[in-house]
Image: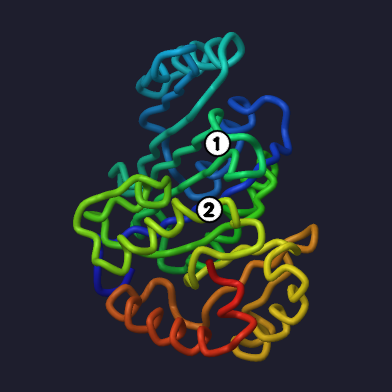
Amino acid sequence: MKGKPDWQIAVATYGNQLAAGSLWGEFMGCAEDLAARFQWSFTHVDLGVHSGRYAPVGKTYRYSDRALKKLADLAKSSKPTDAGLTWAGPDGNVNVGARLTINLASPKGLRPYWRLVITIEPSALPDEGVVFGDAVRTILGVWDRVFHQRYGLVHAMDREKAPVFYFADAGTRNLVKEEEDELDHWIRSQGRYTEHIRNIYWGNLISPTHGGAHHGELLRALREHLGDDQVMPFGEGRHFITLPFDLADAAHYEENLARWRRRLRRVPVIRDALM
């Protein structure tokens, strides 16, 4: 990423419906697919399971066939609550992580039943020839085999702000007031995530329900202000919308994002679609 090597790209998606039967098996299958595509190597895997009245019980292992078998057996005999893994990029550093959280305590439909957050450091992408936006679309497409992604976002943040926890609804340190306010508002309002979007980010995955009765008008407004190339079909009526600036240009990312947020919030149908 140009300008700030300590930045991470966060890809967060949310939904209520699983597209596959074996959550753990499909989760690992997609992880192995991404590892092969981007030359990543596994370092650790973990699984949390429901333990009745008590806090979830978690197991973390260094990646190995034996560890995978242990966790697969645990997933079959228990009710998983979360799963995670870390990869090392081509440079050998541990710089990619994925965290899946399943919300067993909340009735389906009132909040996202599951959330998946992947954080990627720029050096995890194989070479300069890889376009960041194409890599993100690949990641979303792979995970869509397991989870029906109703809403998603792509954002870049300083690593010290811990975006993996920020987008998993946990407060982190070093946030600016705008980020704290946004997180608080999202936690209070996330039951509306199928019709309203959390904020305007570099990448925004929306469903046919976003914007409510004005969904078609919302898409037309986005195409008018961003261009047709930035509003891409993603299957089943969904669209992946990106802002027209370079995600890899970390030195100007916040400036570019603020400029586009101001511009798009002036459009009534877009402003009304925000939480």
Spot the residue most to the front. Answer: 188
Q: Quadrant of residue 33?
A: top right
Q: Secondary structure at mark 1?
A: helix
Q: CA distance from mark 1 to mark 2?
A: 31 Å
Q: Is residue 4 above or below residue 33?
A: below
Q: Is residue 272 left or right of residue 166?
A: right
Residue 144 or 52: which is nearer the viewer?
52
Q: 10 Å neighbourhood of mark 1: few (<14), some, or many (≥20)?
A: some
Instruction: State the mark number for residue 147.
Output: none
Q: How is the image coloured?
A: rainbow
Which residue is pictured at 62% across the width and 35% down the height? 107
Can you tell which mark lies on residue 190?
Answer: 2
Q: Position of residue 268 (x, y in %)?
A: 60, 86
Q: Residue at x 66, y 81 (%)?
A: 229
Image coordinates of residue 175 in percent, x first then y, are 24, 60
**Where is 95 relative to 77, above or below?**
below
Residue depicted at x 65% and y 38%: 108
Q: Amino acid at mark 2?
A: Gln
Residue picked out by circle 1: 32
Specify the amino acid type for callout 1: Glu
Q: Position of residue 228 (x, y in %)?
A: 69, 84
Q: Residue 224 lies in what quarter of the image?
A: bottom right
Q: Position of residue 94 (x, y in %)?
A: 30, 42
Q: Is residue 178 left or right of residue 267?
A: left
The answer to whether residue 93 is left or right of residue 273 is left
Q: Earlier in the sequence, mark 1 or mark 2?
A: 1
**Helix, strand or loop for disc 2:** helix
